[in-house]
Amino acid sequence: MVLSRRWSMFLVLVGVWTWAIWPRFAVAIWNDARAWSTGEIGRGSPTSFLWVHALLIVGSLAIGTAVGLLGVRGWRAARRDRP
C-alpha cells in the first residue's frame, strides 16, 4: 500500500505534534505536588499519579514516533512512484 503525499504529510505532522506537546506535559507532571509522596516536588517517592502519567507519556511518544516514521516512509514511497 502506498499512502498519498497528503496523508503522509499528515502522519508526519502528527508525529511532530506529539513530540511538541508530550515533553512539556511531562515537565508539568513532574512539577506537580501530587506526583510525590511528601507533596514537595522532587522529594519523597513517586506516587501512582506520576507513574500512570509517565506510562501515558512514554506510550504516546512511542506511537507518535511510529506514526511519524510511517509518514516519512509514505512520503518517500509516493515521491519515488510519481511519474
Image: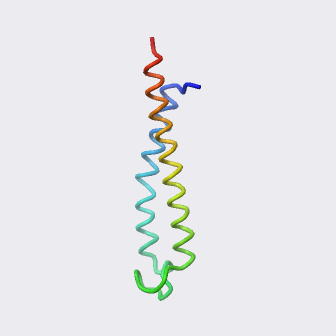
Residue plotted at (54% across, 79% down): 47
Tell which residue pokes out farthest to the top in this image: 83
Q: On the rendered image, what quadrant is the C terminus found in?
A: top left
**How many numbered badges does the structure rendering display?**
0
Q: Which residue is drawn at 40% across and 81% down?
A: 42
Whether residue 3 is situated above or below residue 60 in the rendered picture? above
Q: Which residue is drawn at 43% across and 27% down?
A: 76
Quarter of the figure with residue 16: top left
Q: Quadrant of the N terminus?
A: top right
* 9 or 2: nearer the viewer: 2
What colour scheme has been applied to the protein in the rendered image? rainbow
Q: Which residue lies furthest to the right in this view?
A: 1
Q: Where is residue 6 in the image (x, y as percent from the top left)?
A: 49, 28
Q: Position of residue 11 (x, y in %)?
A: 50, 38
Give the residue drawn at x 54%, y 27%.
3
Choose between 41 and 55: the one closer to the eye: 55
Q: Where is residue 26 in the image (x, y as percent from the top left)?
A: 44, 65
- View extreme (bottom): residue: 38
| Residue 8: image location, x then y, percent | 49, 32
Observer-nearest of 41 and 70: 70
Q: Where is 82 relative to 59, above or below?
A: above
